[in-house]
Image (cartoon, rainbow, N blue to C red):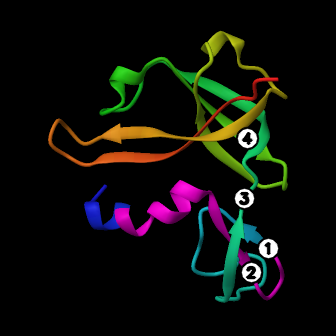
Amino acid sequence: MSVPRYWREEVPRYRLLGKECTGCGAKFFPARPVCTECGSTEFKDHKLAEVGEVVTWTVIRNPPPGFEKYKPYVVALIELEDGMRLLSQVVDVDPDEVQTGMSVEAVFRRVKEDGKTGIIQYGYKFRPVVE
């Protein structure tokens, strides 16, 4: 990912900030230029909930190039308390302990490094809620 593109997208990625269509109220994350429900191009910011639960997940054991050092890792479909769904890595848990319905919360973490001298990318991940 290029540095300018990364910087343009950092606020939504850092703050879990989506968009809500002002025409019909549909919510999107990540943002899109046109509402898929009504065709409107007018949106306002929508702060996503930071707590949710695992709907389904998979363990990545053969990662794509650039992510080899993180294996194995869990990627899950998470339904947030506000009904939005998103894909995210689940951290701070053994892959064998992840289960459907597990409560998770958003955390800010390092996502990737572009080599030893490249940009370090940060963003959201989720971890189990400690009760």
Q: Which residue is mark 2?
A: 21
Q: Which residue is mark 3?
A: 48
The magenta segment: 7-25
Q: CA distance from mark 3 to mark 2?
A: 14 Å
Residue type at mark 1 is Ala
Q: CA distance from mark 1 to mark 4?
A: 18 Å
Point out the tag, 1 or 4, that comes first from the N-terminus. Answer: 1
Task: Provide residue 36's location: percent of width, then percent of height.
Answer: 71, 75
Point out the tag, 2 or 1, that comes first from the N-terminus. Answer: 2
Point out the tag, 3 or 1, that comes first from the N-terminus. Answer: 1
Residue type at mark 4 is Ile
Are the residues flagged by discs 4 and 3 in contact, CB closer than 8 Å?
no
Based on the displayed image, in which of its 4 quarters is residue 52 positioned?
top right
Give me the disc on residue 78: 4
Q: Which residue is mark 1?
A: 26
Q: CA distance from mark 4 to mark 3?
A: 12 Å
Are the residues flagged by discs 2 and 1 in contact, CB closer than 8 Å?
yes
Give me the disc on residue 66: none
Point out the tag, 4 or 2, that comes first from the N-terminus. Answer: 2
Of the residues tagged 3 and 1, which is closer to the observer? 3
